[in-house]
Image: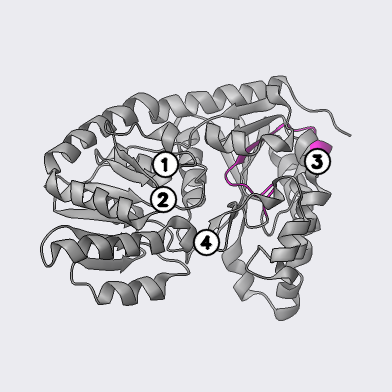
Amino acid sequence: MKIVLVHNRYRSATPSGENRVVDQEGQALRDHGHEVISFERHSDDIEQWSAPRRAAVPTRVIWSREARRGLAATLGEHKPDLVHIHNTFPLLSAAVLYACRDASVPVVTTIHNYKLVCASGNFFREGAVCHECEHGLPWPALRHGCYRGSRVATAPVALAMTAHRQAWKSMVAAYIFISAAQRDLLSGLGLPGDRVFVRHNLIPSRTVPEARRQNTVVYAGRLDEAKGLRLLMAAWDRYAGRTGDSGLRLVIVGAGPLETEVAAWAAERPRVSAVGKVDAQRCAEFMATARAVLVPSTWEETFGLVAIEAMALGVPPVATDHGSFPELITPDSDGVLFRDDDPAVLAAALTDIEEHPERYETYGKQARVTYEQRFDPNGSIEQLLKIYRYAIMHPTNVS
């Protein structure tokens, strides 16, 4: 099969699970003998552009003639069986859908976030879950300035979402949601039910050097409020206040908007290390030696990538009890779920990890079994290929 993967890559300065998923799935498809052509744009490039060109980025969010022409040329040259669209923001836009329609190439899209109905993409505003735009887009988003806290910045995002809503509903042959929870939260889109599929992200098995468990817990991911960093810091201070100079160590891996705040907080706590952004292998090594991996997200995660990466390493995830986590983690079997509205609950979980290491060792062994049974990479690719075959056999015919 010949597939064109369409993706606007996120900035490299901030960890992006979505970039990793696109790369991992593309490589897995190649490893299974399929021809994969990448059609990408890089958000990093914007910083190198001239001031007038940067000023025109909001218009590209709404409609990118360059992307439509570029993809049309790629489709004409390679004549693929289908196009798989991941992220189109900010440099590709919905214009890529029209290029596929004009070339009569079926489209599969993976919906990684909530961007089709939420300007910020995460149903999260001012430190709390927010669903105001679910049935009222774009007005709440414009009123609150949900994208980057700016009404001016939000306007093109909201306009693009409303202007091309029908295109996203009629020009796609198959929609992939990465969890059932995400599918249910976006049910208001009214997508054709026979074209909707739930498929978890592909998580490859990673080999790390043999290492003994250490008395540590690890947070790995983007450092921002939606990911629960402030919840984690408050919970850690409660936990550490009870244990004094002994007990667990916390390792925080990642970069993001709260990086300076997290680094300053960690510097004042001898049992906390903020190591910044590291490569995937080094991150896996940190997780592999931990008693548990903490996933304290306060937004409704569409898929807990880090949680499943921990399971693949035989380490139990300790995650919030909403979003996709309840369908990924079986509490007190292969991990732990906790309420995200009270730092004391996470602090109690940290105490439990410290006092019952054998329990978490058992959870970790079961976590690896869960990974092998439910998240096997070969099975994931087979499921993706079935969706591709469906899209090829049931293309949309919008003109």
Is residue 278 among the parts visible in the rendering? no
Nearer the observer, 43 or 333: 333
Say which label, 4 or 2, has the lower sequence index: 4
**Dot 2, how many residues are within 10 Å of its Cα: few (below 14), some (14-19), or many (20+)?**
many
Residue carrying label 2:
340
Instruction: Pinpoint residue 365: horizontal percent, then vertical percent.
Output: 21, 32
Q: Give me the disc on residue 231.
A: none
Q: Amino acid at mark 3?
A: Ala
For marks 1 and 3, give the CA distance.
34 Å
Residue carrying label 3:
167
Query: Which portion, as a residue range, is magenta?
Result: 101-118
The answer to whether mark 4 and mark 2 are in CB contact below 8 A is no
Nearer the observer, 385 or 296: 296
For marks 3 and 4, give the CA distance.
32 Å
Instruction: Pinpoint residue 40: horizontal percent, then vertical percent.
Output: 62, 52
The answer to whether mark 1 and mark 3 are in CB contact below 8 A is no
Residue carrying label 1:
321
Residue carrying label 4:
127
Q: Circle 2 — which element? A: loop
Q: Circle 1 — which element? A: loop
Side of 238 where 13 appears, left or right = right
Side of 270 where 130 appears, left or right = right
Instruction: Pinpoint residue 384: horizontal percent, then vertical percent.
Output: 54, 28
Q: Amino acid at mark 4?
A: Gly
Picture quarter containing residue 62?
Answer: bottom right
Q: Circle 4 — which element? A: loop
